[in-house]
Image (cartoon, rainbow, N blue to C red):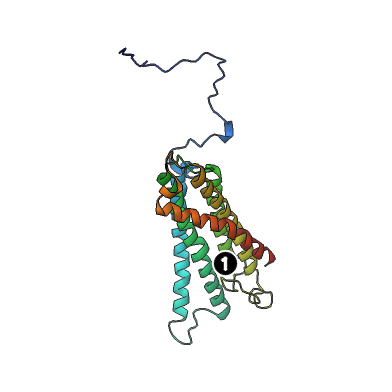
């Protein structure tokens, strides 16, 4: 058996050999490892999962403050802490925040972090779309809450049943923020759902059949399939609203 020593120096390539130092140019994976740039530009599924979780906890605090305001108003008869109109706004925004900005992104946080690890994938199928999904969701959450400073929050109930959402019962622009903000959030959910479905179907480790996947991955896969079919329907309803 021959023993071959590994060269201690890096392999020197002749000039004009055709080797590109920065493949894909601006489309190369971000290289920042530390600092805020590493988080803002990341396409790593773990960091995106952490950012999903941190954002959902941030909105959880906002939703918790709104919940405390509701309960403070209802703590005793005849409370004057919130007017009738403001109470409707807080009630509506609390529901929107907890469902669309806390529960759903918290699920996305665990799915983004764990699914590639559980199926033996290097990353999700479309890392850049994964980052786009997160930043779109964050933009939706910020947009929805800017309504507080631009005429008041949505006041037709988080379920947005007619005629409560009409101009007679909701004359402010709050429901406009509701409809547009949830359209943006729905786009983020749709992008993330397609990404995770493709990841589970195409990036499983060799030998891992669908029936060998962990229960969490199965639950996430089924949830994302349902989401892919449900979000377009909700989008149409929000467009009509």
Instruction: Using the image, determine if residue 176 lies above or below residue 37.
Output: below
Position of residue 136 measured from the top left corner of the image (x, y, whole percent): 57, 52
- Outermost residue, bottom side: 77
Residue occupying image coordinates x 43% and y 45%: 119
Position of residue 89 measured from the top left corner of the image (x, y, whole percent): 56, 73
Question: Which quarter shows the C terminus?
Answer: bottom right
> Dot 1: what SS?
helix
Nearer to the camera, 121 or 147: 121
- Is residue 141 shown to the viewer in this render? yes
- Is residue 54 shown to the viewer in this render? no
Question: Which quarter shows the N terminus?
Answer: top left
Residue occupying image coordinates x 41% and y 45%: 117
Nearer to the camera, 187 or 149: 187
Q: Which residue is mark 1?
A: 148
Residue occupying image coordinates x 65% and y 75%: 162
Residue density around tag 1, few if under 14, some if 14–19, many if 20 or more, within 10 Å: some
Position of residue 184 measured from the top left corner of the image (x, y, whole percent): 60, 57
Position of residue 182 measured from the top left corner of the image (x, y, whole percent): 59, 61
Image mark count: 1
Nearer to the camera, 147 or 133: 133
Instruction: Using the image, determine if residue 149 lies above or below residue 8.
Output: below
């Amino acid at each position: 058996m021959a023993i071959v020593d590994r060269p201690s120096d890096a392999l020197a390539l002749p000039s004009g050999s055709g080797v590109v130092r920065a493949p894909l140019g601006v489309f190369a994976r971000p290289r920042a490892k530390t600092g805020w740039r590493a988080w803002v530009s990341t396409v790593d599924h773990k960091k995106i999962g952490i950012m999903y979780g941190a954002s959902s906890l941030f909105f959880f605090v906002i939703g918790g403050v709104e919940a405390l305001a509701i309960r403070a108003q209802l703590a005793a008869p005849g409370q004057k802490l919130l007017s009738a109109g403001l109470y409707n706004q807080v009630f509506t925004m609390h529901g929107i925040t907890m469902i669309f900005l806390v529960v759903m992104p918290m699920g996305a946080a665990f799915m983004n972090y764990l699914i590639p690890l559980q199926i033996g994938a290097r990353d999700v199928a479309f890392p850049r779309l994964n980052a786009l999904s997160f930043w779109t969701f964050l933009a939706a959450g910020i947009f929805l809450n800017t309504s507080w400073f631009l005429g008041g929050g949505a006041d037709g109930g988080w379920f947005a049943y007619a005629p409560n959402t009409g101009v007679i019962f909701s004359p402010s622009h709050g429901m406009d923020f509701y409809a547009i903000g949830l359209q943006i959030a729905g786009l983020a959910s749709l992008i993330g759902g397609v990404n995770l479905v493709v990841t589970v179907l195409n990036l499983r480790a060799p030998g891992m059949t669908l029936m060998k996947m962990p229960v969490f991955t199965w639950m996430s896969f089924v949830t994302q399939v349902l989401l892919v079919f449900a979000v377009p329907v909700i989008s149409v309803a929000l467009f009509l609203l």
